Amino acid sequence: MRKLHLYLLTFVLCLIGLGLTYYKIAVIGLPLAASEQTEVWNIETRVSFRAKPDNAIKVSLPLPPNSPNYFVLDESFISAGYGLAVEQDNTNRVAHWAKRRAQGKQLLFYRVVLLETEESKQESSVPSPVYPQIPNYPEDLEPIIKGMLERARQQSADTVSFSQRVIEQLNIAQSAPAPELKPLLKHITQPRSLAKNLSWILEGARIPSRIVQGLRLQDGKEYSDLEYFLQVYDGERWRSLNIKDGQEGLPSNFIIWQIGADRVLSIEGSSESSIQYTVAKGLREAINIAESRSVEKNIHLMEFSLYSLPVHVQNVYKVLLMIPLGALVVVFMRNIIGIRTFGTFMPVLIALAFRETELLWGVILFSLVVGLGLLLRAYVEQLKLLLVPRLAAVLTMVVLLIAGISVVMHKLGLEMGLSVALFPIVIMTMTIERMSLTWEEAGPAEAFKQVTGSLLVSVIGYLAMNINEFQYMFFTFPELLLVVLAIILLLGRYSGYRLMELWRFRAFIKNKL
């Protein structure tokens, strides 16, 4: 029954630890490696204009709307001296800059970092648009437009194919204009006017349509204008069409910047205005992206993560969270391998002390100080002191030894000898005391065996605790300590032979076989 209880407990611990880890990875998007990076798009919008004297300045600039295919990770506005307000309506976000007086050339910047999301192929649900009324076309254009709509109706089967036929007719007429189409084509001089006229013509068939403007995301590209596409509503969703050839769908690297045919930039009180978009591909740490997305998704789990602590406290926990892993190493080496050590925690503490001195110099300093301290401890023993004064005397001698070693190594140009901390001093003092007691009770062979075992386990624990991947995993997913706890509990019930015992009794085992 007790064993079943233990198995159920370890199963629950592993289930909770691994389940929370999976949730953080799959839902929040936390990366498995600290160095993992994700490609993002950096877009800079540069607005330039010359202010008119004695005129107030008002600048309106559409911003990329919340999109299902691109997630806004970060955005910033650079506009010294200008007041800024960002407004959101049903379709667009718009930044409004204002200033009472300005002189000379003015520059405004908007920078945004975009992340392409997994939901890029999913169509977001939108309310049904209002079906338009048939416009009152001018008398000279009405027969032309009705003729185009009639031909499109005969050559199409649904809303999308109907719109594609209209687009094709208008573009063919542009390349080889017939005399009767000249009145219509004189209004089409730019992509913007082409898109507006297509939408206007489709209203004659009562097809809801709208114009979208956006950018193709290509590394190192600069644009002075947005690209136009036409969207028609087929009764269920908006379908995007290229206004040049009628091809359906937006390019894979296209981001919708504005919905509607309004001009991108509106400036009052200025002249000689221009706008420029610069696109660049970059990398950003996946952990920062996961934090931003959890805020956007209103997932509050990250608010209670260790990343929410002050940085200096985070650094402390990066060390503390590795102690259970060091303890697991000690348990494994003692219960499975059979290496004797000075208690359970002493090797872990020695491994932590090595963090102050690095491994090689740590082993050298540890061996030197413990060896000299053991000799001095044997001398103090002759004085027949009580426990506390004896420990205080050993501690004082350890401090003097480390100070002397530091001075000598500094004179020799070995700066690693200066890696002194209060923590290793206490650990070395306790190690000397434990070794002395073991020497007196079990003899020098057992004392050296245990100190050697402690040093070996400490080295292995230090190597395990200093693996950067482990440090990141336990700090980002501290629930994994529940899995470590489950393994320690299982190892705690192991009562079979240890590897050292099998080696020790190998002759007996051979004879038995």
Image (spheres, rainbow, N blue to C red):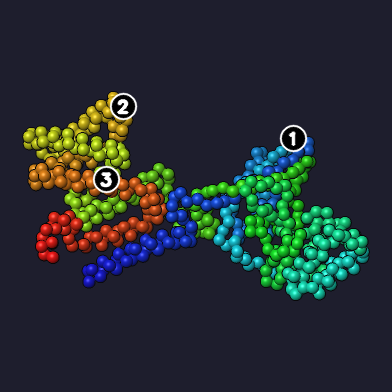
Question: Quadrant of the image for the N terminus?
Answer: bottom left
Residue at 25% x, 26% y: name it.
408
Residue beneath label 3, please? 459
Residue beneath label 2, please? 413
Q: Earlier in the sequence, mark 2 or mark 3?
A: 2
Is any part of residue 317 visible from this angle?
no
Q: Which label sits on residue 104?
A: 1
2 and 1 marks in contact (CB < 8 Å):
no
| Amino acid under disc 1 | Gly
**Spatial CA span between label 2 and label 3:** 26 Å
Side of 412 relative to 112 (left or right): left
**Spatial CA span between label 2 and label 1:** 62 Å
Q: Residues within 10 Å of mark 1 (few under 14, many from 20)?
A: few
Residue at 57% x, 51% y: name it.
40
Describe the element under mark 1 as helix, strand or loop: strand
Describe the element under mark 3 as helix, strand or loop: helix
Viewer-closest of 171 and 233: 171
| Amino acid under disc 3 | Val
Task: Give the percent coordinates (x, y) of residue 349.
Answer: 26, 45
| Amino acid under disc 2 | Gly
Q: Quadrant of residue 103?
A: top right
Question: Quadrant of the image for the C terminus?
Answer: bottom left
Farthest-out residue, top = 411
Task: Give the percent coordinates (x, y) of residue 75.
Answer: 60, 48
